[in-house]
Amino acid sequence: MTKIYNGDRKQMTGELTSCTLCPNQCRVKRIAGETGLCCMDDRVKIASYGPHFGEEPELVGYSSSGTIFFSGCNLLCEFCQNYEISHHRSGDYYSVEELTEIMLRLQQYGCHNINLVTPTHFSIRIIESIKYAKQLGLSLPVVYNTNGYDLVDTLRKWEGLVDIYMPDLKFIDTCKSGKYTIAGNYFEYAKPAIIEMQRQVGDLVVKNGIARRGLLIRHLIMPDGQSDTYDMIDFIAENIGTNAYLNLMEQYRPEFHARNFDLINRRISSKEYMDAVRYAKSKGFRNPEYIYRCF
């Protein structure tokens, strides 16, 4: 490959001498090998990548979503269903150039998009790769697939590079987010983050069944009201609008440390799920394409 962004790399690498990419504000010298709460230094670590069929139909389309699962996490949920990747940080290290090659390979496979799963803590390096890939012919929509614990300042670094934002909004109550994640202040940052995402890309645009641009909101319904589902629906309706693509997900299952918490140590019932769907519809989320069961 040709030489990559020496000027940009020098400027952006400086941000890793005192890392403030996410709300954790660890301020560690990742460029020197130090790690913060995400346990990652400045190298990109990837657990897996390839065509993926387990996303929303508008992302999978008739081919697949070109998904890249990044290792580590800045939220570290106690109930994480991908804990091998987030908590145990399985995977291998890749250079910026190698990540660029992965993106171009996924495009060659015929994937509909480049789906970056948990990219926040690697923002600097991934942005470099996307810019380089676009120089080399990448034309697919880029999906920022996040837990929602993002800084507006970091999201603005992605503006013009992300086509589809896909946050999984989790909690509003500080006691719940502090109990089930490392971030008691989760919603303090998730709220302005999703508003910024909406500002950048607007409502989801789907052409010929394929998502092209916009905001796709996920919310994982947890047992016994532990995910603040009704308050979250109210927030989205009032701040983003009922035209928002809202995926109320029912696939919660007690994984990782969830069995240590009585209230989340079971799957949700059909009634819990359908009650949430009915409530969302009562608030004005009418389009049945926007509320469905996702397995």
Image (spheres, rainbow, N blue to C red):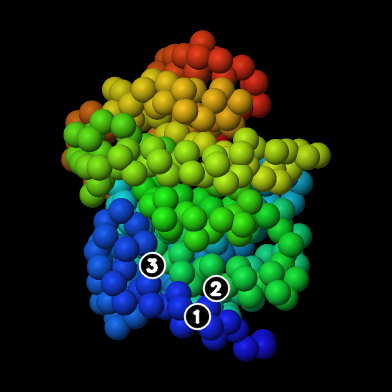
- Residue 26 percent location from the top left of the image: 24, 64
117 vs 134: above or below: above
Q: Are marks 3 and 1 in contact (CB under 8 Å)?
A: no
Where on the picture, by quarter, is residue 292?
A: top right
Give the amino acid at mark 3: Ser
Where on the picture, by quarter, is residue 11?
A: bottom left
**Residue in the picture at 52% in, 44% down:** 197
Q: Quadrant of the C terminus?
A: top right
Disc nearer the start of the sequence (2/3)? 3
Few, some or many residues within 10 Å of mark 1 (<14, 14–19, 20+): some
Q: Dot 3 lies on which element?
A: loop
- Residue 212 percent location from the top left of the image: 71, 46
Disc nearer the start of the sequence (3/1)? 1
- Residue position marked by numbered label 2 in the rendering: 128
Nearer the observer, 243 or 86: 243
Foreground: disc 2 or disc 3? 2
- Tag of residue 90: 3
- Tag of residue 9: 1
Give the amino acid at mark 2: Glu
Foreground: disc 3 or disc 1? 1
- Residue 158 percent location from the top left of the image: 53, 59
Q: Dot 1 lies on which element?
A: helix
**Residue in the picture at 34% in, 44% down:** 189
Q: Is residue 193 visible?
A: yes
